[in-house]
Amino acid sequence: MGHLQLPPGKKIAVNLGTDFDAQCLWLGGFNKPSPSYMSRGEYGAEVGVPRLLELYRRFDVKSTFFTPGHSVDTFPERCREIADAGHEFGHHGYFHENPTLISRDTEKRLIDLAFKTYKNVLGIRPTGYRSPYWDYSENTLDLIEEFGFDYDTSLMGRDVVPYRPRRWEINWETGNRPGKASKVLEIPVNWYLDDFPPLGYVTGGQTGMQDSDTIYKRWKDIFDYAYDRVPNPVYATCVHPQIIGQPHHMMWYERLIEYIAGKEGVWFATCAEIAACWVDDDRDRELMNAEDIRGVSPQPADYPIA
């Protein structure tokens, strides 16, 4: 497997990723267009983003804001502030749609719709993709290759090192078979490094509201493991302005950034900067030219899971 060629004097790449989902999180993610949920998205734009921009400025952090096209269209001035502060924008779908629930044509249309918004409002074309659901349809990898993305950050086949994601043939009563690797680099994500599962409350569903000291310790432990034990690692996190922007969450997040910034050789970088440092080896090139095996076999008729 290849490796990150970090800049001279740097020991670890850190991307403090920010998913600026705003109101569309509650649309595409939960189908909850009520005033209460829309106000939570508004809070992310009007309170959370300014607080994050100030915090990132103080510690000289450049983040990647994975922002659905819907958020750009709804809060264009806030997005221009993000761009003016020097942060990267990553593609994050249009209305935070779930790729596993839609057709190839719809998925492609929404990716293109977001591209049009990025161009019309911000004058940019993002080079990286993050699935709104941290999941793929059977078409997603083909589509992000077709659209020419340099990197993706949606999958979990590694934790603190990038890799070239492979297609798989999925079988129930024989082993799965790996297929061709993608030319799109994967900067892996991790539910343990996402603020929404432990801290985001959803009425009647996700409870959230876990102790923030526990989250701080978990994120610090993962950083320490990467820093101390893995050569040329990447530490990629994900926060949501409407979650992390709450006062008590800003306190533990600031404490974490201060801790990381105090370590020698830390490189705060955008995902695009990290992807540009990747060096393939012969094994990567071999896998990118492997047989194109893929697909999911039918579930056995006598197995009762719906």
Image (tube, rainbow, N blue to C red):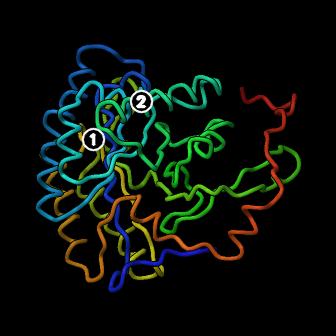
Element carrying mark 1? loop
- Tell me the residue that label 2 is attached to: 116
Mark 1: few/some/many CA within 10 Å (<14, 14-19, 20+): few
Q: Residue at x 80, y 60 (%)?
A: 290
Residue 115's place in the image compared with 210, above or below, is above
Sequence order check, earlier mark of 1 and 2: 2
Q: Nearer the viewer, residue 269 or 34?
A: 269
Q: Nearer the viewer, residue 195 or 264?
A: 264
The reply, left or right, for residue 64 in relation to residue 184 is left
Q: Quadrant of residue 205?
A: top left
Mark 2: few/some/many CA within 10 Å (<14, 14-19, 20+): some
| Residue 59 locus on image (x, y percent) | 15, 65
| Residue 259 locus on image (x, y percent) | 21, 71
| Residue 63 locus on image (x, y percent) | 29, 55
- Residue furthest to the top: 34
Q: Quadrant of residue 13?
A: bottom left
Q: From the viewer's perspective, is the residue at label 1 or at label 2 nearer?
A: 2
The reply, left or right, for residue 254 in relation to residue 70 is left
Q: Residue at x 66, y 55 (%)?
A: 182
Q: Amino acid at mark 1?
A: Met
| Residue 12 locus on image (x, y percent) | 37, 75
Residue 33's place in the image compared with 19, above or below, is above
Q: Quadrant of residue 23?
A: top left
Q: Amino acid at mark 2?
A: Lys
Which quarter of the rendering shows the N terminus? bottom right
The reply, left or right, for residue 287 in relation to residue 22 is right
Element carrying mark 2? helix
Q: Nearer the viewer, residue 63 or 196?
A: 63
Q: Residue at x 29, y 31 (%)?
A: 121
Q: Which mark is residue 209?
A: 1
- Disc count in the image? 2
